[in-house]
Amino acid sequence: ILLPLAIIKLLRNTHHDELLET
Protein backbone atom coordinates (compact mmCIF):
# COMPACT_ATOMS: atom_id res chain seq x y z
CA ILE A 1 0.00 0.00 0.00
CA LEU A 2 2.92 2.32 0.71
CA LEU A 3 4.53 1.40 -2.57
CA PRO A 4 2.36 3.64 -4.79
CA LEU A 5 2.71 6.45 -2.27
CA ALA A 6 6.49 6.37 -2.53
CA ILE A 7 6.31 6.35 -6.33
CA ILE A 8 3.97 9.35 -6.34
CA LYS A 9 6.22 11.17 -3.94
CA LEU A 10 9.24 10.47 -6.10
CA LEU A 11 7.40 11.53 -9.22
CA ARG A 12 6.18 14.70 -7.53
CA ASN A 13 9.68 15.45 -6.30
CA THR A 14 11.05 15.18 -9.82
CA HIS A 15 8.34 17.46 -11.15
CA HIS A 16 9.02 19.97 -8.40
CA ASP A 17 12.71 19.92 -9.19
CA GLU A 18 11.96 20.63 -12.83
CA LEU A 19 9.70 23.51 -11.90
CA LEU A 20 12.29 24.93 -9.55
CA GLU A 21 14.97 24.67 -12.22
CA THR A 22 12.92 26.81 -14.59
Image (tube, rainbow, N blue to C red):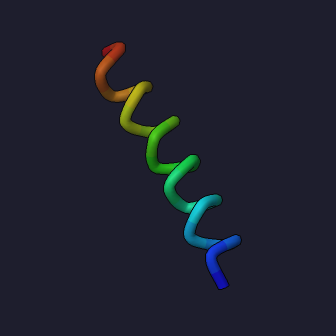
Query: What residue is rendered at 64% in x and 59% in y?
Result: 7
Q: Nearer the viewer, residue 3 or 20?
A: 3
Instruction: Name the image quarter holding the N terminus.
Output: bottom right
- Between residue 12 and residue 19, name the one nearer to us: 12
Percent position of residue 22, x then y:
31, 15
Image label count: 0
Residue 17's x, y, as percent?
A: 41, 26
| In this view, 16 is above or below 22 | below
Residue farthest along the front direction in this orientation: 2
In the shown orientation, is residue 16 left or right of residue 6?
Answer: left
The extreme top residue here reads 21
Quadrant in the picture for residue 20 = top left
The residue at the point 56 percent across, 49 percent down is: 11
Residue 14 falls left or right of residue 19: right
Image side of residue 4 versus residue 11, left or right:
right
Q: Eyeballing the image, is 1 above or below 21?
A: below
Location of residue 10 in the rendering, given as x and y in whole percent from the top left corner: 57, 47
Q: Residue furthest bottom?
A: 1
Across and down, in percent, residue 9 comes to 50, 55
Query: For this view, does 20 lie left or right of residue 3?
Result: left
Q: Is residue 2 above or below residue 8?
A: below
